[in-house]
Amino acid sequence: MSRRPNVSFLPRRSVLGIGAGLGLGAAVAGCTAGSTSTPGGPATRTLTVGFVAEPANLDFTRTDGAAIPQALLVNVYEGLVKLDQNGAIVPLLAKSWKVSDDRLNYTFELVDNARFTNGRPFTADDVIFSIDRVTKEWTTSLKAKMDVVAETTKIGEHSVQVTLKQPSNSWLYSMATRVGAMFSTTGVDDLANQPYGTGPFRFVEWKRGDSITLEANPDYWGAKPGVDRVVLRYFKDATALNNALLSGGIDVISAVVAPESLGQFGDTARFQVIEGTSTGEVVLSLNNGRPPFDDVRVRRAVRHAINHQELLDTAWAGRGQLIGGMVPPSDPWYEDLTGLYPYDPAKAKALLAEAGAEKLTVKFRIANLPYATAAAQVVKSQLQQVGITANIEPLEFPARWLDQVFTKADYDLSIVNHVEPRDITAVFGNPKYYPRYDNAEVRKLFAEADAGTEDEQVATMKQAAKIISEDAAADFLFLFPNLMVATTAVKGLPQNVVSESFDLTGLSKT
């Protein structure tokens, strides 16, 4: 996988699959899959996609969680670069770039015909504004990814240079994530409700508790999207989501939330099942910042108490992959760490006795999402067998979980799927992040990996990941699969998930 371009020039990206908008009328009120038409007018191709986690608002500069970039990144907001299906960095709003020999200066040549959906042209001023705004105005944990930037300089109306404080292997990659999203200098007054981007789709309406509607951007600078309108529908449970696809109410289940139900979609004339990998690590978080999990012996006991294969088989029908750490196989520094903590209840009990913690009762606050609730029941049962009573408390996701667990760290155990790509440094490199893991050696290794050569980065990141796993900073339950179901009319669904975005730009519907 490419980590940083080692060439000085990248050509303008292919327009295949990159949307170019069709002029449409007012937004439809309904959310039914299919096509609509007006008398004497062409049919409107509508794609309806089902999800389970609705955004709390539409501003990912001030709100953590994956639901917002899942809906808006790449589709509405574009960056200078994006990730292709192989995880490689490719051009987007920057048609090319050069990297100086000392790796400190990135000179981007911008497309000259992009416009924001508020009517403003995209220029170098917007790049400077967007990058500077991350450090000055963003309040989410990911803003630290831009700390390495020293200054951003306008070279011309469509040319900009970014100067780093020191070489960074991760900075350009991070520009393909939400922190690299480009905003209009005049379009940030109400990001929670009204996003303005340069993407192939524009925001139309949000029916809270029900759906978000996007339509093709008539002023898009690239090629046309394969559909005229997209409706993102949100469901409370797996049964409702499955029934919506079975009844024709939606075209796609974005992520199957009840793998055992896949048999309902066995009619290959009607349905297709997509199965691949993702960057999402389903993590059993341990609060390192307070008792009892400030004691490494207790954390290690938890890891030995979990039978991970049994958990995967029971909670997620065996779909997914055991990895033993916070690095997915798609990253260059992945190694299988599942052997570090084999299932050993006797060892778990001995560690608890050594720590004087034979009988523990802990607060187990989880996101009320299907994978988390299913996994939590298995974890609770397995911990009970070694003397740990875990009282499960489902929290509404995202709002309550983000407030109580992520922000206030008021929990002992939690479960959530970390979907952001290459997020190990954010999760375990910041002592204030919700696991409250504080390891100076790991932070030093992260810094060395980022500044070193690419070979040094791989070796050093492997070393850091192994220390985190050995230290039982958390327990890594399984790698979440990319498991989707759609009607056979939908084309272009990706096998693997490589970014936070549910990328609509390459989808079409016959």
Image: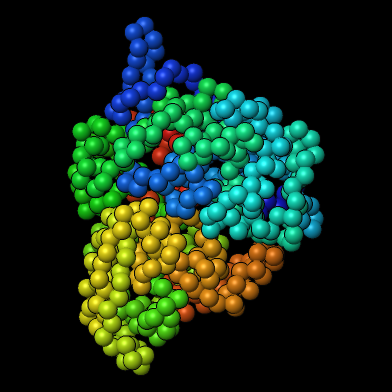
Left or right of 198, for residue 126: right
Q: How many marks?
A: 0
Left or right of 48, for residue 433: right
Q: Is residue 226 visible?
A: no
Residue 145 found in image quarter: bottom right
Residue 350 found in image quarter: bottom left
Q: Is residue 278 visible?
A: yes
Give the image location of residue 116, x and y in percent: 59, 30
Give the image location of residue 121, x and y in percent: 65, 28
Give the image location of residue 49, x and y in percent: 34, 37
Give the image location of residue 306, x and y in percent: 30, 75
At 56% from the left edge and 37% from the top edge, which residue is drawn?
189
Q: Quadrant of the N terminus?
A: bottom right
Q: Relative to 79, does residue 1 appear above or below in the rendering?
A: below
At 57% from the left edge and 23% from the top edge, which residue is drawn?
219
Q: Quadrant of the C terminus?
A: top left
